[in-house]
Amino acid sequence: MTTTTKPATPVAAAPARRIGPGGLALRQGRLEITQFLRSRESVVFTMGFPIIMILIFAAIFSDEIAPGVSYTQYFITGMIATGLMTVSFQNLGIWIPIERDRGVLKRYRGTPMPKWVWFAGKVIMVVVIGIAETALLLAVSVALFDLDLPATAAKWLTFGWVSVLGVTACTLCGIAISSLARTARSGSAVVTPVALVLQFISGVFFVFTQLPSWMQQVAALFPLKWMCQGLRSVFLPESFGAREPGGSFELDRVALVLVLWCVIGLVLCLTTFRWTTKRDG
């Protein structure tokens, strides 16, 4: 007697789970963070530079610049601002030309992945590293220099919107200035001098009101000066506002200038950003 075996019915493969826009952005953000952490030089410079500078200034300057305000307390606000600028403006302005020169951006553009996902990954990386760097700087400042953290919700709110607007403006400007570098090697030469000049004239290394008036006027054209001023309103006594050039911390003007730079940076990104080098066409 012959037994007939029925062929097994094929089991339909489960459809692959489609990743939504948010998932794509988060995955790209994790990739950008991983790449950043693998670069020891970038990690050490970005995370360590503000702390090293604070330690140096604390060893050199021990006097008060106003009743109840030490040099160290004043410079901590500038270090927070310059740290946020470093992780956004400086890092992006240097690393994007490297990726462009290596053909990484060209390959990204040739994939089905929406172009905005690549930019979202950069933004996520800047935000995560910026938060980690700021938290580390605040922890060191509280532990070693008796920094008083904001005592009211209003000051924390100010700290939040100044940081968000400042990082947004610096991120957009960093993406925009990356197009000026013709090769991977020239990225640092283009961006680093700009960052250093802005730090010297914006009240990061010196008391802003002690700088020449023409230098103060030039600094007022750029976002770093306003980031520093906004952060001083958070960490310094309210009475210190009278020592600012405008006679107060001028938070309304801080917000206006930073928003304006966000718009300028976005326009520059949309009109100048290049996915390929000139030799690629």
Image (cartoon, helix red, strand yellow):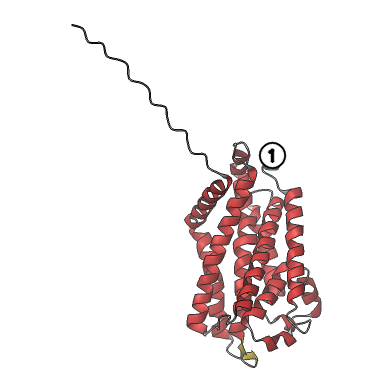
The residue wearing badge 1 is 279
Q: Amino acid at mark 1?
A: Arg
Specify the quadrant of the image occupied by residue 90: bottom right
Residue 50 location, x and y as percent? 56, 72
Residue 35 location, x and y as percent? 51, 52
Name the residue at 70% across, 45% down.
Answer: 274
Residue 81 location, x and y as percent? 63, 71
Decide which of 192, 106 is in the foreground and name it: 106
Name the residue at 66% across, 69% down.
Answer: 161
Relative to 145, is 75 on the left or the right?
right
Relative to 224, is 130 on the left or the right?
left
Decide which of 117, 62 is in the foreground and name it: 117
User: What is the secondary structure assignment of the residue under circle 1?
Assistant: helix
- Mark 1 neighbour density, 10 Å: few (under 14) some (14–19) many (20 or more): few
Specify the quadrant of the image occupied by residue 54: bottom right
Residue 190 seen in render: no
